[in-house]
Image: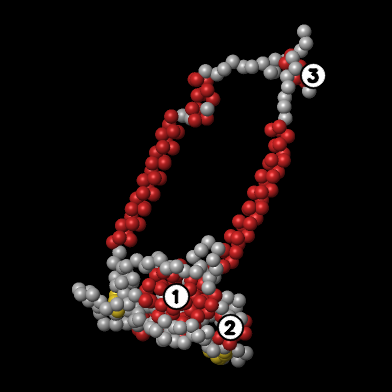
Amino acid sequence: MAATLRRFHGLRLLKSAPALNLQQAKNLSSAGSWASGNKKLIGAVGAITGGVGALLFALEQSVQASGSEVHAPAQSWNHKGLFDALDHQSVRRGYEVYKQVCSACHSMQYIAYRNLVGVSHTEAEAKAEAEQITVKDGPDDTGNYYTRPGKLSDYFPSPYPNEEAARAANNGAYPPDLSYIVSARKGGEDYIFSLLTGYHDAPAGVVLREGQYFNPYFPGGAISMAQVLYNEVIEYEDGTPPTQSQLAKDVATFLKWTSEPEHDDRKQLLIKVIGILGFLTVISYYIKRHKWSSLKSRKIVFVPKEK
């Protein structure tokens, strides 16, 4: 090592270079080497981006402030936590509410009975639920259509054959499909819960047409759907008291699951990702300390040539 350093010293490789003046240091910096035009362009792009973002935020706030509906308050849902799963007992009860109340007007054309298996029902229970409906199928070998009991692969039946029939039965209003209603409405399950429990008498000055009802959480306040949830309007299989708020909470949780069936899987994946990244971080830190320990602890000694 000493001999190598002597050779470097002889070649003047270890000779200290003169200090750089301030102008030379500025020329070596990457920022100083940029053209003045590029700096102005980047500044203009940043200013425009900030202005557009501020404009969009202001428009969003103005739209919310100018709306004619009351914004749904946030509820303390069990699944709102970062690692919290859906309440599957509530999902099962919410299915009962949909089946006995909501399915009279609203369809769920993107949900099949097989989706209930492992979430709210066993396979046998889901099969029994599917067999309660009648499905038109065919044609058979003779070219005729026939009816059969439902099976797991069948989707929830629609209460109306087409949109025109649905509007005719609801004073011209079309009951929306509920498969993804939580994702489609601002406020999500908070909006669903508030809408189902928010019916009131119309205040003075509000005129409702025949077949309309007042609900402050609905845009405009006039809604064609009558109040459908009351205390003890149905009975739960598990004996839970069927109060209005309990019914609304359970059906909102059920609709949250239909809108995001991957909800629990996504949070399980998050737990796995955090665990793996934590393990890799510890290993990476250990390897970094191990590899660099010899470099950080080494000592270089210069032995000048003896005269």
Q: Nearer the viewer, mark 3 or mark 2?
A: 3
Q: Residue at x 42, y 81 (%)?
A: 243
Q: Residue at x 78, y 20 (%)?
A: 2
Amino acid type, callout 3: Ala
Which residue is tagged 3? 3
Q: CA distance from mark 3 to mark 1?
A: 82 Å
Residue 249: percent from left, percent from top:
44, 75
Other residues around mark 1 within 10 Å, as few (<14) / some (14–19) / many (≥20) = many
Please give left or right for residue 9 compared with residue 177 in the image: right
Q: CA distance from mark 2 to mark 1?
A: 22 Å
Dot placed on the residue nearer the N-terminal end, 2 or 1: 2
Q: Residue at x 44, y 83 (%)?
A: 242
Please give left or right for residue 220 compared with residue 149 in the image: left
Q: Quadrant of residue 128?
A: bottom right
Dot placed on the residue nearer the N-terminal end, 3 or 1: 3
Q: Residue at x 75, y 17 (%)?
A: 303
Residue 235's place in the image compared with 293, above or below, is below
Residue 145's place in the image compared with 118, above or below, is below
Labels 2 & 1 near each other (Cβ < 8 A): no
Which residue is tagged 1? 249
Q: Secondary structure at mark 2?
A: helix
Residue 87: percent from left, percent from top:
53, 73
